[in-house]
Amino acid sequence: MNEFKQNMKEALFYKKTGKGDLVCNLCPHHCKLKDGEKGKCGARVNNEGKLFTENYGKITSINIDPIEKKPFYHFYPGSSILSLGTFGCNFHCKFCQNSEISQSYKERFNSIKDTAPEDVVSKALKRKNPTGIAFTYNEPFVWFEYMLDIAKLSYDNKLKNVVVTNGYINIKPLEQLLEFTHAFNVDLKSFDNEFYKNFVSGSLEPVKKTMETIRNKGHHLEVTILVIPGINDDSELFSKMLKWISSNLGKNTVLHINRYFPAYKMTYYPTPLSTLKVLFNMASEKLNYVNIGNVSPAESGSNTNCHSCSQTVIERSSYNTIVSGLDSNGYCKKCNSHVAVLK
C-alpha cells in the first residue's frame, strides 16, 4: 500500500466499473471517477481503483454549542452539545455560509492531526450532563465513514447523535446511519428543482425522499430554509412547500425560516424583515411550530407555545432557553400534548 493510501480510509458505498474506474454511490450525484479523480464533494478520491475518503478523522471545527444554534428547538431544548465538522460538501451553494471549510479540500488541512472516534466520544462523555454529538458546520454526509464510527460508539454510550444536513444522500447509507442517530435538521434550499440546479448543483427530489425516510423511521426532524430575496422567496412556491411539509412530514414539524446575509459568491442584499414576517404568517397557518432565525430575539418569535392550548412552554432569548411548561417527558403541563423530545 502506497503512502497515499496509508493516510486514507477506504470508503463505503461504491462500485468498481472496470479498468480502474468506479462509481461512488453515497449520494445522488453517483460520481463516475477515473483513477486520481475526486468526487464533487472534494472528499472522496479514486486511487488505483478503490475509493478512499480523505477527511476521515480530519476535524476542522469543534465546539460546545447550544443545541438551538444547530438549530434544534424541540430536541433537548436548553442543552448544549459537542459539535464537529470537517471539510467538503456535495453541494456548491453560491450562498454558502461556511465556505471556508465546505468548499475546501484536503490540501488546506494537511496539518490537521487525525482524531480517533474514541477520542471524540470520550470528549463528549467528560462533559457534565452530556447530551451527545452534533455533526454539523459542513455537510456531514461526505464524512460518512467517520460519522458512522463515532455515532456507533456514541450510541453505545447512551449519547444522542444529531445531524445538520442538506439531505443529499442515497437511501441505503441513510438507513444505515439511522440505526445510530436520533435527530436531523435538514436544510431545504428551496422547493424548486431549477433553484437546486442553478444555485446548489443538486436536485430537490432526493432531499424530499431523505426527509420522508427520516420521518417514517420515527426520528426527530426539523427543517430549515434560508430565504434569499428575489431567489427563493416566491410566496406561491413557499405555499407549495408548506403544503408538502404538512402532508408528508406532519403539522408538528418544526420549521426555521432564516434570514440570508451576503456570503461566498452571492452579494444580494439581506432578506427584508417584512418578507420573513409574511412567510412566517403563511407558515403558521399550515404548521404548528415556526421560527424566524438570524434575526434579533425581539424579531424572532422564538418562544414555543403548545399547539393544542397555546400555553408558552419554552421561553427563549437568543440562546438562553427555559423549558417552563413541559414535564420531564416533553408533554405540555396544561393539556398533556407532546411538544418536544426531552429524554
Image (cartoon, rainbow, N blue to C red):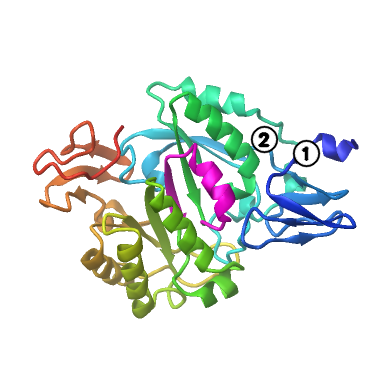
Is residue 129 positioned above or below 233 on the image?
Answer: above
User: Between marks 2 and 1, how big is the CA–CA gap?
Assistant: 10 Å
Residue 73 spot, x, y in % from top left: 32, 46
Is residue 213 positioned above or below 163 on the image?
Answer: below
Query: Does the segment drawn in magenta span residue 130?
Result: no
Crowdedness near tag 1: few (<14), some (14–19) or many (≥20) residues, C-alpha within 10 Å: some
Q: Residue at x 37, y 23 (%)?
A: 129
Front-lying residue, 140 or 155 = 155
Q: Specify the quadrant of the image occupied by residue 229.
A: bottom left
Say which mark, if any, is on residue 229: none
Residue 81 visible here: yes
Say which mark, if any, is on residue 57: 2
Question: Residues in magenta?
Answer: 167-186
Say which mark, if any, is on residue 8: 1
Residue 283 spot, x, y in % from top left: 27, 66
Front-lying residue, 319 or 280 = 280
Q: Residue at x 91, y 37 (%)?
A: 2
Residue type highlighted by circle 2: Gly
**SS of the residue at dot 1?**
loop
Residue 313 spot, x, y in % from top left: 17, 43
Q: Is residue 130 left or right of residue 140?
A: left
Q: Is residue 193 left or right of residue 81?
A: right
Residue type highlighted by circle 1: Met
Total marks drawn?
A: 2
